[in-house]
Each structure stands twice: as C-alpha cells, then as structure tokens.
C-alpha cells in the first residue's frame, strides 16, 4: 500500500472520535484514499496502530477521525500517514508500528535580522582569563537574546587562536549548552553550536587586542538534519535558495567541542532584517542527542 505523510498543527484539541481536516497532498484525489492511516505527535515515536485514524475524502479537504485514546491538545504538531490504494514501494515497508517515521516538514525562520558582529560583546580586552562583558545591542542585563537560534561569531584583528573561548547559554528549547572555540586570527570564527541566548563568554587567557562577539548567519534547526540530502528545498522570500553550506546534526555524545546536535543551514543571501527564509527537509523529528553543559 502506498501512503503520504502530512504535517499540521492542531488549532483545537482533538479527543477520541474527534475530527480535523487536512489539505490534499499535491496530485492526490479522494478516489486514491483507502480510508486508513496512522497518526503521531512530532518529536515522539509513532505508537499508533494502523487504522487509528479514519480518512474520508471530501471535495476540497480530507477529514480525519481520530481513534486514539489520548486527547491531542491544541497547538500539537502532528503527522498523519494517509494510506493510498497501490503498491507500497518505500523502504519502510514491513517495519513495526512503533518506529520513528521520517517526515517532510517545512520550517519558517521568518524575517531574520542581519548578523551583528558585536551584538553580544562589544569590543574589549581582558586581563588574564576572564569573562567578557555581555553588553552588546542584543543584550539585556548581561544576557544576549538572538532573534532565532544562531551560531556565535568572534572577531579580532589579532592572532588570538591560542586562546580558548567558552560560550554558555541556551538553545531554542531552553536547554543549557556550552561550546568552546579557538579565538580568531585576524578574521571571524564561529561556534559549531547554535544558541538562542548567550549568558557567558569567557577567555582562557589574556585578550591583549580587542575581540567582539556577535551573531552569525548560521541558522539552527528545530529537528535533527540527518543527511545533507534530506534538504528538499530552501526559500528566501519567493526565491529558491540552495542553502548549500550546511551541517548535519552531530550524533556523537555531546561535549563542548562537538557540533550542533540538530545541525544548521546557511542562506545564500545574508539576512538583512527584510529577507524571510524557509526550509523543507526530511527528518525523524528527533531533537538530537542531549546538549552538553558544564554550567
């Protein structure tokens, strides 16, 4: 049997025997619907059995009748696997019902602010190993909050590569994380982890020539990107964007030096507070391995 997976966010709670509607996938009509399917909340395993939802095709919308025993709250991101008449030729055929199914999701970054080289820490030096003062334009009361989850950039005209900088903060889900990075050498270097907030930037030795810390044009993802080939398409406004300089989620046990647990993407055209970005990619809906923190 063939199938299509549709993702949506529930506008209202759905109890047992409750219904909600979905738009038809491109190229699919009511006559192709077999009437059965599965449902799961994004970010969890699919524990539903086949036929836990009823599927009925209308003139313009698909009506889904939920048969599960737990009410799905309003705002829940769900994926519905709709069975179609025909042969099922995908690699998932024959797998048990309890399995994380890869789905195709579209993530809207929205309008993204331009990178800000000193938005976290203004130009400064240190005497010995010390914390940098977080007082850039993105900071309030010593905490920098980025518009979206982004990598952190360090910039200096000096050779600070022998100094290790440690960045602490939180990700989009509020999880604490720690990243280390060798300092710049008359250039800009960036963290391999993405941050939503930055609460501390520290140096392992004296910073004799000024350094700044700010936001970088590397956008964190909500769910793990397992393979670069799982990126279906990127968009900047109405323009296709290859987003070709990307990183997959690092599956290794997280340390201060490992990469981002979910990965990131880099737009071709830099954000400027007017450009809006979206990405469509396939994901198993994992939030990645646990973040590392030494806080």
Image (cartoon, grey):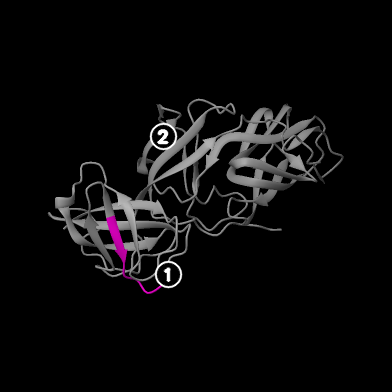
Vertical arrangement, residue 73 with respect to residue 86, above or below = below
Residue highlighted by disc 1: 71
x, y percent for residue 156: 72, 28
Which residue appears farthest toward the left when viewing the image? 86
Residue 67 magenta: yes
Vertical arrangement, residue 84 with respect to residue 244, above or below = below
Vertical arrangement, residue 203 with respect to residue 40, above or below = above
Q: Name the residue rendered at 44%, 55% in the picture.
A: 11
The answer to whether 5 appears left or right of 285 in the picture is left
Q: Quadrant of the N terminus?
A: bottom left
Local packing at callout 2 (Cα closer than 10 Å; few below 14, some 14-19, many 20+) is many
- Mark 1 falls on what kind of element? loop
Which residue appears farthest toward the bottom when viewing the image? 69
Q: Earlier in the sequence, mark 1 or mark 2?
A: 1
Q: Nearer the viewer, residue 97 or 255?
A: 97
x, y percent for residue 79: 36, 56
x, y percent for residue 45: 39, 65
């Amino acid at each position: 049997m063939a199938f299509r997976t549709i993702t949506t966010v529930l506008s209202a709670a759905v109890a047992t025997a409750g219904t909600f509607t979905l738009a038809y996938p491109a190229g699919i009509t009511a006559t192709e619907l077999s009437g059965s399917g599965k449902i799961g909340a994004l970010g969890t395993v699919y524990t539903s059995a086949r036929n836990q939802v009823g599927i009925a095709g209308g003139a313009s919308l698909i009506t889904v009748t939920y048969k599960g025993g737990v009410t799905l709250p309003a705002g829940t991101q769900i994926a519905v696997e709709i069975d179609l008449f025909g042969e099922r030729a995908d690699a998932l055929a024959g797998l048990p019902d309890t399995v994380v199914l890869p789905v195709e999701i579209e993530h809207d970054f929205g309008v993204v602010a331009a990178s800000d080289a000193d938005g976290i820490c203004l130009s400064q030096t240190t005497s010995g190993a010390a914390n940098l003062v977080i007082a850039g334009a993105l900071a309030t009361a010593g905490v920098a909050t980025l518009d979206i989850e982004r990598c952190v950039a360090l910039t200096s005209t000096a050779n600070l590569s022998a100094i290790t900088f440690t960045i602490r903060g939180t990700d989009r889900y509020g999880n604490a994380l720690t990243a280390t990075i060798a300092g710049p050498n008359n250039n800009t270097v960036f963290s391999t982890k993405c941050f939503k907030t930055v609460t501390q930037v520290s140096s392992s030795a004296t910073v004799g020539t000024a350094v700044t810390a700010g936001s970088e044009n590397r956008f964190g993802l909500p769910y793990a990107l397992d393979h670069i080939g799982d990126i279906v398409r990127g968009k900047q406004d109405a323009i296709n964007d290859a987003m070709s300089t990307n990183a997959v989620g690092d599956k290794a046990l997280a340390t201060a030096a490992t990469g981002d647990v979910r990965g990131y993407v880099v737009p071709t055209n830099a954000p400027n507070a007017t450009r809006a970005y979206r990405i469509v990619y396939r994901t198993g809906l994992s939030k990645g391995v646990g973040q590392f923190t030494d806080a």
